[in-house]
Amino acid sequence: MSRDDSADLDPAAGTEAGDEPEADAAAGEFGRQMAAAAEKSGLGRIARDETLTPSDLIGALGGIRGLAEAILPGLVFLVGFTFTRELVWALGASVGLAVLFTVARLVARSQPTQAIAGLIGVGASAALSLWTGRAEDNYVIGFYTNAVYAVAIVVSLLVRWPLVGLIVGFLMGDGTAWRGERRKYRAMQLLTFVWLGMFVARLAVQVPFYFAGNVEALGATRLLMGVPLYALLLVFSWLVVRVVYPAKPAAE
């Protein structure tokens, strides 16, 4: 290992790695909790794979059923409102579909978490939209969600503990050791910036449509910048992780 990649100095802080043991411990515990949650997420399902096939990617996105649960309620609302201009009916169809997905999960005794979370999101958004009488308010909660993620990532970058690095480090069994290797630290910093870019881009593109009252454009960009963009970031993240954590050669 070269001097630049050594763990003697923390490349993030420019100080000796042992100077902040309490901060390291706190970040480590936070990283473990995040990684435990990420194990069930898209990145957690593909991070350790040596190859990435289309079926792997679909599985990381929740499978066919998970994709349907993520996409169809929003699509039904957009199509329904665009052609009928009836807010109540469009919202009712969207929420009803989310309820059917949740019931199907419960009946099949499969993992209902994603469907329930989707139902809560769809229901809360619909309630807000009905309360204000504005179709575009069906997307407001999504703005706040993206903003919260963006702020959390910015804070992690400012304190020099890139959030994606914490997650990947524990997923790959590296803990927080990656912070002591300049190459890994910079790769995790890059990944964190890229994920930040997704949340910021969503807000930058969609919020103007909201204020313009353009429900059709808002709904379409919400769908396009949802699962498809998330899938692209998963593939990019997997490529970076594979470069930084190459597969170990098989023992002879």
Image (cartoon, helix red, strand yellow):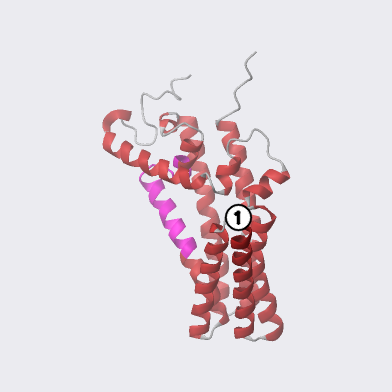
- Left/right of residue 177 with respect to residue 232 in the rendered view: left
Q: Is residue 155 magenta-colored?
A: yes
Q: Relative to 137, is 18 above or below?
A: above
Report the residue at 67% width, 46% height from top. Answer: 57
Q: How many C-alpha atoms fall within 10 Å of the one at disc 1: few (<14), some, or many (≥20)? A: few
**Which residue matches tag 1?**
110
- Prevailing secondary structure class for the magenta stretch in the rendered image: helix
Q: Is residue 150 magenta?
A: yes
Q: Which quadrant holds the C terminus?
A: top right
Q: Quadrant of residue 251?
A: top right
Q: Percent position (x, y) of residue 54?
A: 72, 45
**Res. 16 visible in picture:** no
Which secondary structure lies at badge 1?
loop
Give the answer, above or below, for where 23 lies relative to 119. Answer: above
Q: Position of residue 220 (x, y in %)?
A: 66, 69
Residue 252 in the image: above or below residue 168 = above
Q: Which residues are magenta?
A: 145-166
